[in-house]
Amino acid sequence: MDRSPRVTHISWGRMEVEGLETGKDFKLYPGGGRPWDWTEHGTRHEPGIQPADVEELLDHGSSVIVLSRGMKSRLHTMPEAVRFLEERGVEVHIEETTKAVDLYNRLAETEPVGGLFHSTC
């Protein structure tokens, strides 16, 4: 099993992830990750994270997903995204970003975890 990369630093508008360039928002999964470009699926703070945003995490073998809400918890998650994951037997956690990073890093030690991380609002 490929290990999910650890987040080594999180602050407002800045994330550092093992093996990746510094960035603002990330999609992370077993074996790697990439910057999270909200324009790919038209994501906005409301209605929030969409099923299409999380599908790539499953494609890379994630069986546990951590979704961040932003540093001020302004990013929502569409109920359809949660339902999409739960219907596939995926454990889902939704937390404020710093808590999400802590949980993700803990899970990455033993689980094929994926995550979506927003480092502002």
Image: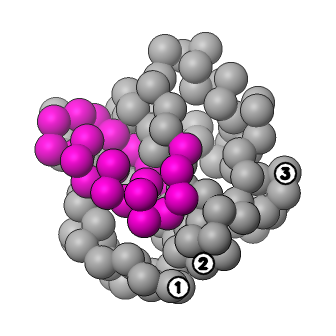
**Mark 1 element type:** loop
**Mark 2 element type:** loop
Which residue is depicted at the point 66% across and 75% down?
121
Q: Which residue is mark 3?
A: 47
Asked if the magenta segment contains residue 101, the reply would be yes
Which residue type carries mark 3? Pro
| Residue 61 position in % (x across, y down) | 36, 32
Local packing at callout 3 (Cα closer than 10 Å; few below 14, some 14-19, many 20+) is few
The picture quadrant where one finds residue 46 is bottom right
Label disc, if present, on residue 36 of the rendered structure: none
Magenta residues span 94-116
Which residue type carries mark 1? Gly
Asked if the magenta segment contains residue 17, the reply would be no
Pointer 3 with pointer 1, Cβ within 8 A: no
Label disc, if present, on residue 120 of the rendered structure: 2
Which residue is depicted at the point 45% across and 25% down?
91
The alpha-carbon separation of the residues under discs 3 and 1 comes to: 21 Å
Answer whether residue 65 is visible to the viewer in this image: yes
Is residue 50 toward the left or the right of residue 57 in the image?
Answer: right
Q: Which numbered disc flags the more N-terminal residue, 3 or 2?
A: 3
Q: Which residue is mark 1?
A: 13
The alpha-carbon separation of the residues under discs 1 and 2 comes to: 5 Å
Q: Total of numbered circles in the picture?
A: 3
Answer whether residue 31 is visible to the viewer in this image: no
Q: Which numbered disc flags the more N-terminal residue, 3 or 1?
A: 1
Pointer 1 with pointer 2, Cβ within 8 A: yes
Local packing at callout 1 (Cα closer than 10 Å; few below 14, some 14-19, many 20+) is some
**Considering the image in quadrants, where does the N terminus appear?**
top left
Q: Which numbered disc flags the more N-terminal residue, 1 or 2?
A: 1
Is residue 71 toward the left or the right of residue 63 in the image?
Answer: right
Q: Nearer the viewer, residue 104 or 52?
A: 104
